[in-house]
Image: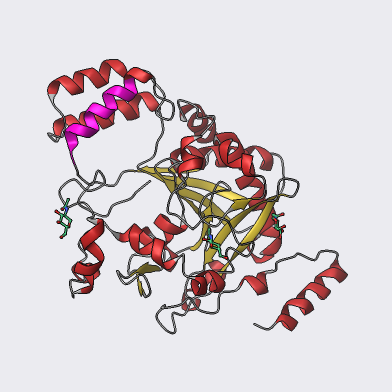
Amino acid sequence: MGQSVVSVVCVLSLIVGTCFASSQVSDRITELPGQPKNVGFAQYSGYVTVNEQAGRALFYWLVETPASRKPESRPLVLWLNGGPGCSSVAYGAAEEIGPFHIRPDGKTLYLNPYAWSSLANLLFLESPAGVGFSYTNTSSDLYTAGDKKTAEDAYTFLVNWFERFPQYKHRDFYIAGESYAGHYVPQLSQIVYQRNKGVQNPIINFKGFLVGNAVTDDYHDYVGTFEYWWTHGLISDSTYRLLRVACDFGSSQHPSLECMKALNVAVLEQGKIDPYSIYTRPCNNTQSLKRELKGHYPWMSRAYDPCTDRYSEVYFNRPEVQKALHANLTRISYPWKTCSDIVGNYWADSPLSMLPIYQELIAAGLRIWVYRLVAGAKYTKD
Ligand SMILES: *[C@@H]1O[C@H](CO)[C@@H](O)[C@H](O)[C@H]1NC(C)=O
Ligand SMILES: *[C@@H]1O[C@H](CO)[C@@H](O)[C@H](O)[C@H]1NC(C)=O
Ligand SMILES: *[C@@H]1O[C@H](CO)[C@@H](O)[C@H](O)[C@H]1NC(C)=O
């Protein structure tokens, strides 16, 4: 895609009254380093500014359904990972439902046969600013992220993104995610629903949402988590009782000191395990890359590979990958990480329960799908 094409689009859109610093054409991904040839689907990625004063911009990656499956007739699904502070590119796209997964060499990609993009156009968003390639020019933003700002910025992102991709205006639109996105998804859904109210033929043609392994209601999430640990022999009877007392009615994002102490005891008792897949070995940093390269190819046996996020930290920090993705154009001062500790640790507001939003949106007739994935089958993280 030459610069001239971009400027032509910009000149044309100037005539119509809009010219964006970044356009759909310049966001088109020609090819990602190490990707299989002739994949038959289009990809776009780039930045959408969500706050000009602060200089906050969110990074997105759109993967369309294969041309043979008529992407223009398929819905658009926004995908969000949780944490808070974790990247949808790291987990959703590169480990879970995206079209490409990363080989242990951290350089080459292989096709994911279970990609959701074979049925829907997938829009991965790294959110909030400070996560992945999404950034802010006001560093204090990193220490003040929370549910409210995340939802408002994501809504602004959507409004601006649809201007860049007008072919998706009025298209059936769903919001999906997992884990702490159990907060993001209903909260963003509520904003979209409320701002669409009374609008005929809304641009964001919101139909419903999907959440997996979702943080939903802190009290019941705690009860379920503790019971799971206890009934799987990961913690003792006494630690189980301690957790139930110390964390009763507490916030999972801001646990009380007593609850934090009890959680530490539980973690120590569990030992070095992979909490996302308790029957398989955890990732062993020092040996994993070497072992995998020796010819043990986990994607062939479809075995769970606990080290995949290590491969993505190598892949997405490659300058040629960032160039192909139109990412990190402003030379962000820290490397790309799967999860931002700062954003996650300083998380501000986190309501105890999403159930009131469910009540509102169920009554509104939206389609809602809440699902759970069981350890040992296909897994999800953060
Ligand atoms: C952030 O600052 C850089 C460097 O000044 C600038 O190029 C970029 O456009 C700014 N980002 C936003 C979203 O304003
Ligand atoms: C990780 O691998 C190294 C080298 O093979 C080994 O010495 C170490 O014990 C392993 N650690 C775990 C937790 O498996
Ligand atoms: C952005 O690029 C700079 C080099 O220009 C690099 O040092 C930094 O790690 C990168 N950050 C991210 C988030 O990709």
State the residue in front, 41 or 74.
41
Q: Residue 349 in the image: x percent, y percent?
A: 54, 29
Q: Is residue 165 above or below residue 179?
A: below
In this rendering, position of residue 332 left or right of residue 287: right
Q: Residue 378 in the image: x percent, y percent?
A: 27, 55
Q: Is residue 125 above or below residue 114?
A: above
In this rendering, position of residue 228 left or right of residue 259: left
Picture residue at 15% right of the left edge, 48% below the top: 279
Picture residue at 18% right of the left edge, 39% below the top: 271
Picture residue at 27% right of the left edge, 23% below the top: 262
Image quarter for residue 298? bottom left
Q: Residue 35 in the image: x percent, y percent?
A: 42, 77
In this rendering, position of residue 358 left or right of residue 312: right
- Residue 210 magenta-highlighted: no
The magenta region covers: 259-271
Image quarter for residue 261? top left
- Residue 265 magenta-highlighted: yes
Q: Residue 196 in the image: x percent, y percent?
A: 67, 43
| Quarter holding ligand 3 | bottom right
* Image quarter hosting the N terminus: bottom right
- Residue 151 visible in rendering: no
Colour scheme of the picture = secondary structure
State the residue in front, 146 or 92.
146
- Residue 190 visible in rendering: yes
In this rendering, position of residue 48 left or right of residue 15: left
Q: Is residue 294 above or below residue 347?
A: below
Picture residue at 36% right of the left edge, 23% below the top: 219
State the residue in front, 12 or 304.
304
State the residue in front, 37 or 360.
37
* Magenta-drawn stretch, dominant element (helix, strand or loop): helix
